[in-house]
Image (tube, rainbow, N blue to C red):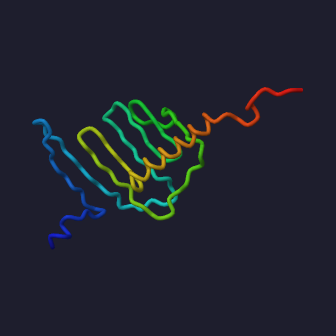
Amino acid sequence: MSSSSSCTITCAEVERRSIVTNGLRHRTDYRVEEVLTRGQERGLSVTVGRWGGAELRPTRVFVWLGDRDLGHERVLPTGLEPRLLRGARRRRHLRLGSCHIAFLGNPAATLGLLGLNVARRAATASRPDSDSSGPTTP
């Protein structure tokens, strides 16, 4: 096996590292699913142990406490329709101690699009309507 191929992570491999922070050893796992995902919106999911977590998508945010059960999560929409990824992607998983991070698509692009959509929604909400711009005279 060449040195360049040993650094890349294929779909079936899992990279495990032990990280020492402040004298405490944490286990880190990175995994890429073998199944290609098509027709889903990009997303970034962060779960912190059994406390809860959030799934961030450009068009909405799902927030939950405890275990994620269907119907027991809060949905915060940004008011836009979901846009699905055109190409097939593999969902990636990263485990840092008790935190689990999963993402589909580029996480930086997901956060940027979510921030842009939230800013647009805030700007339209703070803009006064044209019908109520001032007093009307009969």
Question: In the displayed structure, would residue 138 be above or below residue 33?
Answer: above
Q: Could you tell me which residue is drawn at 35 percent across and 58 percent down? A: 33
Q: In this image, 47 relative to 98: left or right?
A: right
Q: Could you tell me which residue is drawn at 82 percent across and 28 percent down? A: 136
Nearer to us in this view, 117 or 104? 117
Residue 1 shows up from this direction: no
Q: Could you tell me which residue is drawn at 76 percent across and 34 percent down? A: 131
How many discs mark residues in the rendered view?
0
Residue 63 shows up from this direction: yes
Nearer to us in this view, 112 or 87? 112
Nearer to us in this view, 109 or 20? 109
Question: In the displayed structure, would residue 137 be above or below residue 56?
Answer: above
Tell me residue 62's x, y (percent).
Answer: 48, 38
User: The N terminus lies in which quarter of the figure?
Assistant: bottom left
Tell me residue 76's x, y (percent).
Answer: 53, 36
User: The C terminus lies in which quarter of the figure?
Assistant: top right
Tell me residue 87's x, y (percent).
Answer: 47, 65
Question: In the displayed structure, would residue 68 be above or below residue 32?
Answer: above
The extreme right residue here reads 138
The extreme bottom residue here reads 2
The extreme left residue here reads 23
Tell me residue 95's x, y (percent).
Answer: 27, 45
Q: Could you tell me which residue is drawn at 44 percent across and 49 percent down? A: 112
